[in-house]
Amino acid sequence: MTSTMQRDQDGTLTLTVTIPWIKVEKELEVQIEESVKNTTLKGFRKGKAPKKMVEEGLDKAKIREDILRKILPQAYVAAIEEQGISPVIRPSIHIEKVEDGKDWIFTAATCEVPQIQLNNYKIKVSEVAAKDKIILPGKEPKQPKFEDIMKALLDTVTINVPKILINQEVDRLMAQVIDDVRKLGLNLDQYLTSTGKTPESLRADYEQKALEDIKFEFALQKVAEEEKITVEEKEIDEAIKKTKDDKERVQMESNKYLLASILRQQKTLDFLKNL
């Protein structure tokens, strides 16, 4: 297996991976042998039919799919190790060439954590937080608004977000909208008509939302790293104990890593509010 990598200006990484035909051929032989063992032809007991007869009746397209399903993940892992990268998303795979007797080639688009510059975020965020904390006579002190903190941070930090990362998040948001619309008994066209949107304008809206959400998430991670904000095991256990819903508690216990990430994010937001 060999690979090459292209790095775009926005940070998108495109791996071109070549799988030698000799490796594909070995997998093909395995597939054929398995088919011979499990095939029953008229006049032969199961697994006793001649290999050539079984092979002639096989669905070649399905065999290719089975082989790809097996060796693509292996080849992709080998490629990212060869290139020394640490992707943060699932790759977008495109099959370039799949022919008998020739090397198979596919591309995989992915990305790593974007480069982040926090700049003078503390000054900007503290200015916003200070305004929200102004105490007026006869009124209770207010907590800084999440939206104000988010805007101040986004306006200050510098993050070059890979397009592939934005597209995947937009696809997720669009799928969620379609699902929600169907639950209301509508189709997408009806929803678009009622909101005065077109597919293009709706996607553009979600691209902006996706960009802001991704930038904010990575900015919070960077702040947490620089300020050494961590979550201890006892904090995770306390959060689980506070959950009243049994089903939700089981889910939290089975995914403590995600819970720790959420708690760390909340602690980072609290840190920003108190600047």
Image: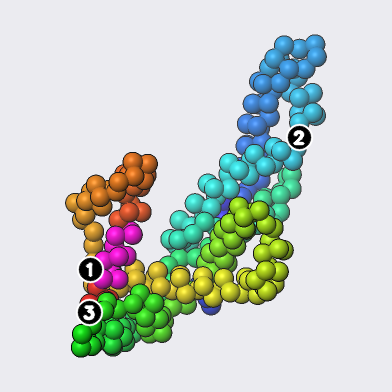
Asked if marks 2 and 3 touch (Cβ < 8 Å), the reply is no
81 vs 193, nearest the viewer: 193
Name which residue lies at 60% across and 43% down: 69
Kind of residue sitting beneath label 1: Lys
Q: Secondary structure at mark 3?
A: loop
Q: Which residues are magenta?
A: 261-270
Kind of residue sitting beneath label 2: Asp
Dot label at residue 59: 2
154 vs 217: above or below:
below
Mark sitting earlier along the chain (2/1): 2
Q: Secondary structure at mark 2?
A: loop
Kind of residue sitting beneath label 3: Glu
Asked if marks 2 and 1 touch (Cβ < 8 Å), the reply is no
Single out the mark in the foreground, 2 or 1. 1
- Gap in angstroms between the C-alphas marked 3 and 1: 32 Å
Name which residue lies at 58% across and 74% down: 205
Single out the mark in the foreground, 3 or 1. 3
Residue receiving disc 1: 228
- Gap in angstroms between the C-alphas marked 2 and 1: 56 Å
Name which residue lies at 80% across and 29% down: 56
Q: Quadrant of residue 115?
A: bottom left
- Gap in angstroms between the C-alphas marked 2 and 3: 73 Å
